[in-house]
Image (cartoon, rainbow, N blue to C red):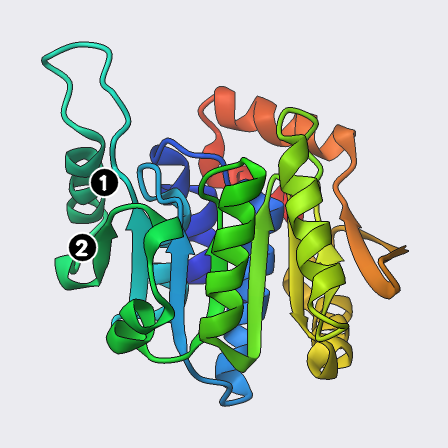
């Protein structure tokens, strides 16, 4: 286990408004560190930045020498005139955390309008691509097509809100992507919020990674099947979630990491 990054996940990360929770943060950590250890290089990209919660997690895990590309419209309206803009808050979060934003690696625009060359010109082929942009079918279709065209052979795509009933078209989009890829891609891991896919020839590698990661040992690993591929579903019992939330709300966030050991 990487104690410094786990400390960041369970303390600093919670100061940023956003949605990635400890199980997925630990999956990000396990995947990226194992890729690095196995010399599986490449850039990192994220569609859908919000205020940077998962972006700064990626930055922390990857280190200062990695190229991480952030793509977002940055058009969230503020409730009052005195509130800073979404982009300003994102940049300020980086400054506060000691991770200044490299604005050369920020694309402020519609991800569905981007060409693959616009990404690879900045960061090369991509080893980890997080998709959390628009949640309509056309958005998921466009973003997954962009990810597929820019992904390294060993790359991973993380789809957010795959089975969230509030966004049913995300589920359709991810299933369509897997079914229309001609068997080239398969899912290997699912959490409550995200689905992780890779090229089929790396399915065994990533499945073994998830099964053997010390950072994921706290979760129940339940084998399921999704569109012909075996998938590890990481179950986070409600009792643990309740203890974790209680600790955070009681000002004991610094100790909440122990719940996930």
- Residue 192: x, y in percent? 70, 40
Quadrant placement of the N terminus: bottom right
The one of 214 and 66 positioned closer to us in this rendering: 66
The one of 159 and 246 positioned closer to us in this rendering: 159
The one of 180 and 35 positioned closer to us in this rendering: 180
- Residue 49: x, y in percent? 35, 44
- Residue 254: x, y in percent? 45, 39
Q: In this view, does 16 lie above or below 110?
A: above
Instruction: Determine the residue positioned at 34% across, 65% down.
Output: 115
- Residue 200: x, y in percent? 73, 77
Q: Which one is earlier in the sequence, the residue at label 2 or at label 1?
A: 1
* Residue located farthest toward the top when viewing the structure as drawn: 80
Label 2 secondary element? loop
Q: Is residue 175 above or below residue 14?
A: below
Left/right placement of residue 97 relative to residue 211 reads: left
**Residue 66 visible in this rendered orientation of the protein:** no
Pointers 2 and 1 in contact (C-beta within 8 Å)? yes
The one of 203 and 66 positioned closer to us in this rendering: 203
Q: In which quarter of the image is residue 251?
A: top left
| Residue 77 circle label | none
Left/right placement of residue 43 relative to residue 21 reads: left
Instruction: Determine the residue positioned at 11% across, 12% down.
Output: 81
Q: Name the residue under label 1.
A: 90
Q: In this view, does 71 lie above or below 197?
A: above
**Residue 183 visible in this rendered orientation of the protein:** yes
Instruction: Determine the residue positioned at 58% across, 40% down.
Output: 137
- Would you call the spot at circle 2 few (<14 residues within 10 Å), some (14-19), or many (20 or more)? some
- Would you call the spot at circle 1 few (<14 residues within 10 Å), some (14-19), or many (20 or more)? many
Q: In this view, does 78 lie above or below 245?
A: above
Q: In which quarter of the image is residue 208?
A: bottom right
Q: Name the residue under label 2.
A: 101
């Amino acid at each position: 286990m990487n104690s410094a990054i786990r400390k960041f996940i369970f303390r600093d990360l919670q100061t940023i408004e956003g949605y990635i929770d400890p199980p997925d943060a630990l999956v990000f950590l396990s995947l990226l560190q194992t890729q690095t250890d196995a010399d599986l290089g490449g850039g990192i990209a994220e569609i859908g930045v919000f205020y940077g919660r998962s972006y700064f997690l990626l930055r922390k895990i990857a280190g200062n020498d990695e190229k991480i590309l952030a793509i977002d419209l940055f058009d969230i309206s503020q409730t009052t005139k005195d509130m800073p803009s979404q982009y300003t808050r994102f940049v300020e979060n980086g400054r506060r955390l000691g991770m200044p934003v490299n604005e050369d690696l920020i694309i402020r625009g519609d991800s569905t309008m981007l060409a693959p060359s616009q990404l690879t010109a900045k960061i090369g082929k991509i080893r980890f691509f997080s998709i959390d942009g628009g949640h309509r079918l056309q958005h998921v279709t466009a973003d997954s097509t962009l990810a597929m065209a820019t992904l390294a052979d060993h790359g991973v795509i993380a789809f957010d809100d795959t089975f969230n009933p509030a966004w049913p078209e995300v589920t359709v989009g991810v299933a369509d992507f897997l079914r229309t890829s001609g068997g080239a891609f398969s899912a290997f891991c699912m959490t409550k919020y995200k689905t992780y896919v890779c090229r089929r020839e790396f399915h065994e590698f990533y499945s073994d990674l998830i099964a053997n990661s010390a950072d994921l040992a706290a979760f129940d690993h339940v084998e399921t099947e999704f569109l012909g591929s075996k998938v590890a579903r990481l179950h986070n019992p409600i009792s643990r979630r309740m203890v974790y939330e209680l600790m955070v709300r009681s000002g004991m966030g610094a100790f909440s990491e122990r719940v996930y050991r």
